[in-house]
Image (cartoon, helix red, strand yellow):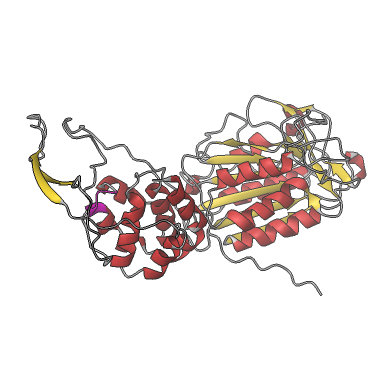
Amino acid sequence: MEERHKRILQRNRVNLVRDLNPSDMYHGLLSEGIFTQDMIDEIKSSGIRQDQARQLVRDLETRGSLAFPALIECLHETGQHSLAELLLDGEPQNQPLPQSVHVRPVVRPLPVYSPMDTVKPVQVVTPVYPTQSVKAMPTTPIPCTVARKTPEREFGKPRATGRVRRDSIQSYKMDANPCGHCLIINNVDFEPKSELSKRTGSNIDCEKLERRFKSLNFIVLVKRNLKQKQIKQELSALSKKDHSQYDCCVVIMLSHGTEVCNNRFPGAVHGVDGPNVPVQHITNYLNGQNCLSLQGKPKIFFIQACGGGERDTGFEVSPDEARPCIGGTGDQTDAMPMSSSSDSLSTQSDEPDAKATLPTPSDILVSYSTFPGYVSWRDTQAGSWYVETLDNILEENAATDDLVTMLMMVSHEVSENSANGLYKQMPGSFNFLRKLLYFQALPCQRPILS
């Protein structure tokens, strides 16, 4: 597809996902040779109507220069005229229309085909334009049929055997109502014996994320100021729920954090009493071995906590890439000194703990607010850099973009902040998802300010 047509589709992606009826389009796009039957089946399996519309638009961008005209034609044929007009509005209007000319058809046979080829020889009518001056015809539009190239192979070559290569990545099913459970653990007030400071501003993060994931159609449960044992109890209770009717599960940890010595998921989060729970243990509660009803379904973990005590001063960039400092003097960190993961296991629990082994990683994504070993910055008035940016990105892009793409946007935005004009922060993620993940984007009700 031409770049200008791709840009038109990208600019109108929200409207197409919202209004396009893909089931009416399949026959036309198949008969025009834009999609193969395998590709149609792949789009149909991507989920609900909006998911199919999103996948159809994404796949169209890979199908050559004839895909856009075929899309417009199919939209008109299926009565979706408003969408066709919306897309045509993006076409340049100042290009002169070519004048119609007299043509003389010449019949030429195609080359002889290989015995392996099952396509029968046909004749092609090639227009030959006169060399003398031509007489302009009336400008009344004339319908024409355009010969389309078969997408699977070139003429004269034998048809490939086996399954046809697909140009799309399948998406997770995300149409359950509600979509799934979301557990938020928000630790703000730490006991004096923990020697950890109060996390001022974390309640702002919690309110934003509670509102955001409710708008994404999750059942949100918020727990505040939990000790290490209580964190494990809540995670164990979540793993024992029946998730068979849901499509996804989300866990959000807002607490002080530290670096731990292990070669699995890095980092750990502290209970308000001081002892920590390693992130690798947090993910283990919901993996395929310990939560059977979440097997094959995405498990997403957001960790707003320090990954260690090191402060990143960044490196110099060219003036074109530099941006004004966004952080202020009220920025705090969620850091604690490095400890061994075995330190957090000394406290006995009445609840069955997840096994401290390398988890079965499929369908798990852990998003960290900062790079392992470094501090994570939090503004006492506006909340943490990471959560504020994540909330904004989800609000603006959840209707059109997949989760991994949005997390890349978050990393880019946060990386351009500065604390006290000096310190930097770099979010990242450990991604073991097997498919694209698109949230159910429902309108988010922001609080009304009096």
Q: Residue furthest bottom?
A: 450
Give the main secondary structure of the magenta stretch: loop
Q: Nearer the viewer, residue 413 or 404?
A: 413
Q: Nearer the viewer, residue 352 or 371?
A: 371
Q: Quadrant of the N terminus?
A: top left
Residue 446 visible: yes
Q: Residue at x 66, y 45 (%)?
A: 410
Q: Nearer the viewer, residue 386 or 258?
A: 386
Q: Is residue 236 left or right of residue 153?
A: right
Q: Please report the bounds of the magenta region as a residue range.
A: 30-34
**Up/down of 424 relative to 438, above or below:** above
Q: Nearer the viewer, residue 394 or 107?
A: 107
Q: Residue at x 38, y 49 (%)?
A: 60
Residue 349 at x, y percent in the picture:
71, 41
Q: Is residue 126 left or right of residue 244?
A: left
Q: Which of the 4 quarters of the picture holds residue 86?
A: bottom left
Q: Quadrant of the C terminus?
A: bottom right
Residue 350 visible: no
| 223 magenta-colored | no
